[in-house]
């Protein structure tokens, strides 16, 4: 890999960058979130420990999106019996992220076990076309990264490793994944190359993962290896809520209950918990849901 000082284009924040080992069947990706991460956490003002875990989950969702060839969304959900009952992060194939921690208003811990103890991790693939798929694994190993490592060790034949870090300003991650044998058919050599790549990545400190640009990070780890670094892909905070989707959700409510709500309040207001967008629906907006049999009684 060439010296990053000679690369003319600086790396902006909020992006993911893929890379390949030229002489090994190994690919990787790095992600750095700044403005998008701050925008997401600013909506709810999470405690530091909760914000850090949400940042790690957001970075993981971006990295996992790159392992799948689809158009749609990838959703990560961590459910636990700890101080954070639910942690959720979502990344679309277009690089749009959103996330939330539910029920964490009183969370004060900073360690993984007390925040997400006795929990499970669900990875959901929601393609625009085709069936939804979900895999579930236990939260284990004292971190989200180790939990993801364990999930892939159980469910995939190809090695996959994660390194995640977040603070109050930034969330970052690094992924390494084996590829099917093409460059190196010998299994012993493949194992040696994989061990080499993972051993060097394991020397990373969280502060390095948070502070270094992709070029600098990869040069520090793999300056003796030949890497191909691809152009960055932008990552942005953008909620997938809409007035139409919110109105469809109202169809799940009993029609008589909707009519009663309209009678009491004059309109129905629904807030998106991810972005705080507010949607208001009056009687004229809900007439097709209420139908001719039920009419709201307005004051």
Image (cartoon, rainbow, N blue to C red):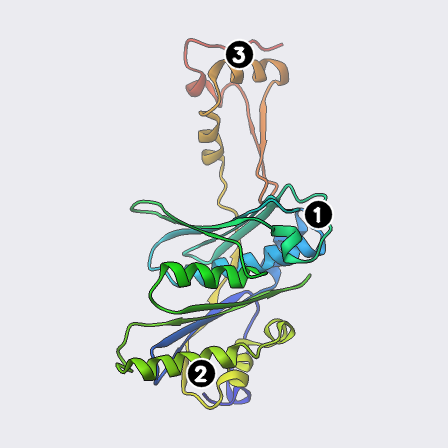
Q: Which residue is mark 1?
A: 107
Q: Visible in this render: residue 113?
A: yes
Image-based side of 289 in relation to 116, left or right: left
- The answer to whether residue 9 shows anywhere in this view is no
Please give the name of the residue rendered at 49% of the width and 88% of the height, measured from the top-left corner.
223
58 is higher (above) or lower (below) than 5: above
Residue 220, position as x, y percentages in the image = 55, 85
295 w.r.t. 267: above or below: above
Q: Which mark is residue 296?
A: 3
First-in-chain label (1 vs 3):
1
* Mark pair 1, 3: CA separation: 42 Å
Q: Nearer the viewer, mark 3 or mark 2?
A: 2
Spatial CA distance of label 2 from label 1 is 39 Å
* Mark 1 secondary-structure assignment: loop
**Occupied quadrant, residue 182:** bottom left
Compute the Cα span from label 3 to label 2: 68 Å
Q: Which residue is mark 2?
A: 196
Q: Secondary structure at mark 3?
A: loop
For image coordinates 61% across by 41% down, the residue present is: 276
Nearest the eye: 95 or 164 = 164
Callout 1: 10 Å neighbours few (<14), some, many (20+)?
some
Residue closer to the observer: 14 or 137: 137
Q: Quadrant of the C terminus?
A: top right
Between disc 1 and disc 3, the foreground one is 1
Q: Judging from the image, what secondary structure is the residue with disc 2 in?
A: helix
- Residue 253 in percent (x, y) is at 48, 22
The image quadrant where one finds the N terminus is bottom left
């Amino acid at each position: 890999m060439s010296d990053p000082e000679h690369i003319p284009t600086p790396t902006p924040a909020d992006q993911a960058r893929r890379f390949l080992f030229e002489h090994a069947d190994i690919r990787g990706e790095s992600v750095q979130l700044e403005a998008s991460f701050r925008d997401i956490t600013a909506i709810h003002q999470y405690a530091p420990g909760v914000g850090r875990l949400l940042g790690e989950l957001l970075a993981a969702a971006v990295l996992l999106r790159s392992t799948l060839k689809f158009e749609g969304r990838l959703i990560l959900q961590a459910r636990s019996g700890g101080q954070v009952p639910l942690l959720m992060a979502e990344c679309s194939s277009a690089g749009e992220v959103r996330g939330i921690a539910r029920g964490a208003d009183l969370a004060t811990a900073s360690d993984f076990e007390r925040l997400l103890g006795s929990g499970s991790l669900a990875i959901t693939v929601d393609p625009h076309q085709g069936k939804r798929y979900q895999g579930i694994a236990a939260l284990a190993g004292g971190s989200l990264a180790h939990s993801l490592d364990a999930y892939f060790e159980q469910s995939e034949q190809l090695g996959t490793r994660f390194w995640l870090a977040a603070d109050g300003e930034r969330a970052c991650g690094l992924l390494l994944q084996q590829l099917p044998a093409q460059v190196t058919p010998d299994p012993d050599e493949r194992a040696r190359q994989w061990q080499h790549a993972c051993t060097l990545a394991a020397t990373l400190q969280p502060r390095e993962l948070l502070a270094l640009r992709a070029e600098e990070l990869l040069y520090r780890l793999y300056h003796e290896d030949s890497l191909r670094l691809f152009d960055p892909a932008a990552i942005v905070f953008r909620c997938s809520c809409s007035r139409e989707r919110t109105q469809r959700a109202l169809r799940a409510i009993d029609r008589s209950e909707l009519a009663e709500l309209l009678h009491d309040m004059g309109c129905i207001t629904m807030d998106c918990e991810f972005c705080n967008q507010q949607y208001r629906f009056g009687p004229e907006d809900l007439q097709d849901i209420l139908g001719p049999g039920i009419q709201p009684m307005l004051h």
